[in-house]
Image (cartoon, rainbow, N blue to C red):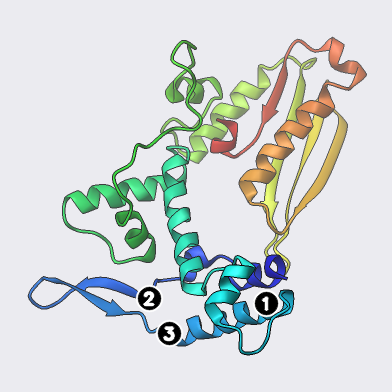
Amino acid sequence: MPPCILKQCYFASETWWPGRTRSKKNALNKPISTSNIVDSHINLLNKVVITCTRAILPVYKTTNIAVLYEEAKLRPSEIELNQISQSYAARTTRLDPYHPLRIRAENITKAKEQNRIPDTRFARLITALPETEHINPLASPPWEIRESRAEAEARINGPMGRTKAQAAEDFKAFHAKIPRSDIQIFSDGSKSESKDGATGGGFVISQFDIQIAHYSFSLGINAEVFDAEATAAVAGAAKALTLASTKLATDLWIFLDNHEAAL
């Protein structure tokens, strides 16, 4: 029961749980604590938690609530919500430096040093973190020589400051120079704007100006466009390597319109 019901109660609480109080400055520019008026919501969630404990434990109606929490190994809703939010904030220090949330967190930290912190829930979570070491989970060992981000952008023919129109013209000129015997994969991913909001992708493989394979797929409603873009590119490459005509090609080219997925 707890994995089903309580997970629904706390779903995405990192985005909507503000905490019982928040700090703000008064007219004298001194920090004061202000209530977020969430007592009624906490009480409702606690009722759900207690109902779960009574459903899974052989207890009496008069059993002490503290005993129910201890025996069921569950926490009061406020403690659980705070832990979820704080864990979410701590995980931002382990994200890729180019991740949007990591960039926002870095900007908030810099703003804190200049005493101009934005008044948002995410900012309050980030500024509440103690001083910690930030790591890059994608960093390579120092003894490995890896190309820089700028070198990678040049290799994949990234925008590099060009406009879309200019990049399109450059691509047409580049595409005309590719040997026709090479395998070319055009992949894409998108998210439906309908009610279900499903995400999907696909690819088309061509060689000698002939379409030799194509495929489309759905990743469901919990995936993002970035996931579909990357999955489509990898799936297209895997499919191309199984084709008999691969032995006639010198190179395999993958074309996609997502810059970060290409990097």
- Residue closest to the eye, 165 or 216: 216
Mark 2 is surrounded, within 10 Å at the Cα level, by few (under 14), some (14 to 19) or many (20 or more) other residues, namely some
Res 5 → quadrant: bottom right
User: Quick check: marks 1 and 2 in contact, CB under 8 Å?
Assistant: no
Label annotation for residue 82: none
Q: Secondary structure at mark 3?
A: helix
Q: Is residue 220 left or right of residue 19?
A: right
Mark 1 is surrounded, within 10 Å at the Cα level, by few (under 14), some (14 to 19) or many (20 or more) other residues, namely some
| Res. 149 visible in picture | yes
| C-alpha distance separating marks 1 and 2 | 23 Å
Q: Amino acid at mark 1?
A: Cys
| C-alpha distance separating marks 3 and 1 | 20 Å
Along the polypeptide, which appears first: circle 3 or circle 1?
3
Instruction: Estimate the x, y position of residue 174 in percent, counting from the top left.
Output: 61, 22
In the picture, the quarter occupied by the C terminus is: top right
User: Quick check: marks 2 and 3 in contact, CB under 8 Å?
Assistant: yes
Q: Is residue 133 left or right of residue 7?
A: left
Label annotation for residue 52: 1
| Res. 209 visible in picture | no
Q: Is residue 239 left or right of residue 36?
A: right
Label annotation for residue 20: 2
The residue sitting at 80% across, 27% down in the picture is 238
Q: Is residue 263 above or below residue 125?
A: above
| C-alpha distance separating marks 2 and 3 | 8 Å
Res 126 → quadrant: bottom left
